[in-house]
Image (spheres, rainbow, N blue to C red):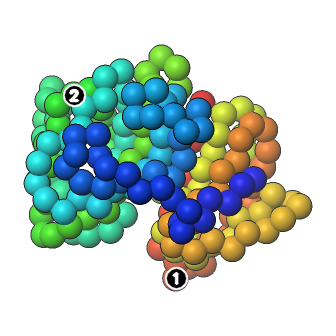
């Protein structure tokens, strides 16, 4: 179990140069935008426009802050995303454009290389399972508010945008206060 504190996330320009992303974790570690097997990041979207195209990549987006946005995804139609809607999976190589509903948003963006890795993004709140077990792959707990994560040997108190990474087999326990905004569980196989 490894803590990835919010203050340590790496800021970098979007692939299309239209904004800035906050890279949380990437595999292999240090891989560039064209060479990763998987990548977890957040982005502040401050204006309408096209998404970066990533050939051979599957992506899931979840809105973590702001009023929401509407995505037009070629071949998949129009989708409205807000903090309350479920994370949206779609191919990152499908041309996609975004229209903000009422000001800037922050999103959680998970991407995996198709045919190499696969992922799921699940919302966590006070009713979330108290234990998360993994046999293989990676589990990332992305905090949007206060929570405690433990593995039986250590206990970590997370604040907003802190992340815990669990690689390979293991079990982690979660404690999310009812007043917390919760977070997301990213599962990568």
Q: Between residues 3 and 119, which one lies in front from this camera angle?
A: 3
Q: Earlier in the sequence, mark 1 or mark 2?
A: 2
Residue 37: assigned label: none
Image location (x, y in percent) of residue 17: 22, 46
Which quadrant would the C terminus be assigned to in this image? top right
Q: Between residues 104 and 126, which one lies in front from this camera angle?
A: 104
- Quarter-of-image position of residue 73: top left
Q: Residue at 46% of width from left, 26% of height from top?
A: 35
Image location (x, y in percent) of residue 159: 57, 74
Indicate whether 3 appears above or below 93: below
Q: Between residues 128 and 100, which one lies in front from this camera angle?
A: 100
The answer to whether residue 87 shows anywhere in this view is no
Helix, strand or loop for disc 2: loop
User: Residue farthest to the right?
Assistant: 153
Q: Residue at 24% of width from left, 54% of height from top?
A: 19
Circle 1 residues within 10 Å: few <14, some 14–19, many ≥20: few
Helix, strand or loop for disc 1: loop
Residue on which the image places disc 1: 179
Image location (x, y in percent) of residue 113: 45, 25
Q: Residue at 52% of width from left, 20% of height from top?
A: 116
Circle 2 residues within 10 Å: few <14, some 14–19, many ≥20: many
Q: Residue at 71% of width from left, 41% of height from top?
A: 167
Indicate whether 2 appears above or below 29: below
Q: Between residues 76 and 53, which one lies in front from this camera angle?
A: 53
User: Residue farthest to the bottom?
Assistant: 179
Residue 94: assigned label: 2
Image location (x, y in percent) of residue 22: 41, 56
């Amino acid at each position: 179990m490894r803590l990835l504190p919010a203050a340590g996330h790496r800021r970098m320009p979007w692939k299309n140069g239209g904004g800035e992303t906050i890279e949380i974790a990437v595999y292999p570690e240090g891989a560039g935008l064209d060479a990763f097997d998987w990548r977890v990041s957040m982005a502040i979207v401050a204006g309408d426009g096209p998404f970066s195209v990533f050939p051979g990549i599957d992506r899931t987006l979840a809105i973590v802050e702001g009023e929401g946005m509407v995505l037009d995804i070629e071949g998949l139609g129009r989708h409205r995303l807000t903090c309350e809607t479920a994370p949206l999976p779609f191919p990152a190589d499908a041309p996609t454009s975004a229209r903000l509903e009422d000001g800037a948003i922050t999103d959680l963006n998970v991407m995996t290389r198709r045919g190499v890795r696969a992922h799921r993004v699940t919302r966590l709140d006070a009713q979330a399972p108290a234990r998360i077990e993994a046999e293989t792959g990676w589990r990332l707990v992305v905090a949007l508010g206060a929570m405690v994560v433990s593995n039986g040997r250590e206990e970590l108190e997370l604040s907003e945008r802190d992340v815990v990474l669990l690689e390979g087999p293991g079990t982690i326990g979660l404690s999310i206060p009812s007043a917390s905004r919760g977070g997301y569980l990213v599962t990568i196989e």
